[in-house]
Amino acid sequence: MNAFLIQINKLLYPYILGYWSENNGGGVVVANARCTQMRGIGFRKWTAFVEAPINLFNTRLEPAIEDHVDETVFANFLKEERIVDLEKALAIVELCKPYFLALRGDLQAQYITTA
């Protein structure tokens, strides 16, 4: 897997980098794990992804793959999300994982994997 994609997904935990396509074009967005909600990179307002009954525009929201992310996308992501210190941001996310797990129902953080 692409190292840039892995780092972005670590920074977005519990969310993922998604790809919103329309007429075989599109771009990367932040999505929830089920790809039912999305927000633009750098934005904070979430919108529900709803398929129209007649899908004339071939619109879909799916997890981003290696082809969607390169060094330019990674640099733009850091800039738009206002991440100045990458190492510090990754450390903060790791420290917050028990909190995110508690919000999702693992109150005792039993399922934390340590590396």
Image (spheres, grey):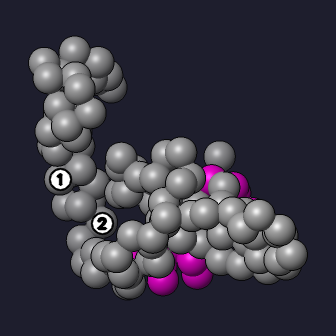
What residue lies at 53% left-to-right and 70% top-to-bottom?
29
In the picture of the structure, the residue carrying the numbered disc 1 is: 92
User: Are there few (<14), some (14-19), or many (20+) residues within 10 Å of tag 2?
Assistant: few
Q: Is residue 72 above or below residue 14?
A: below
**Please, what is the three-letter code of the amino acid marked with disc 1?**
Ile
What residue lies at 61% left-to-right and 63% top-to-bottom?
50
The mark that comes first in sequence, 1 or 2, is 2
Tell me where residue 22 sits by quadrant.
bottom right
Q: Nearer the viewer, residue 114 or 53?
A: 53
Residue 26: horizontal and vertical position, in percent?
Answer: 71, 78
Residue 21: horizontal and vertical position, in percent?
Answer: 73, 71
Question: Can residue 64 be spotted in the picture?
Answer: no
Does residue 68 belong to the magenta stretch? yes
Residue 46: horizontal and vertical position, in percent?
Answer: 39, 70
Q: Quadrant of the C terminus?
A: top left
In the picture of the structure, the residue carrying the numbered disc 2 is: 86
**Please, what is the three-letter code of the amino acid marked with disc 2?**
Leu
Prevailing secondary structure class for the magenta stretch in the rendered image: helix
Give the Cα separation between the discs numbered 1 and 2. 10 Å
Mark 2 and mark 1 in contact (Cβ < 8 Å)?
no
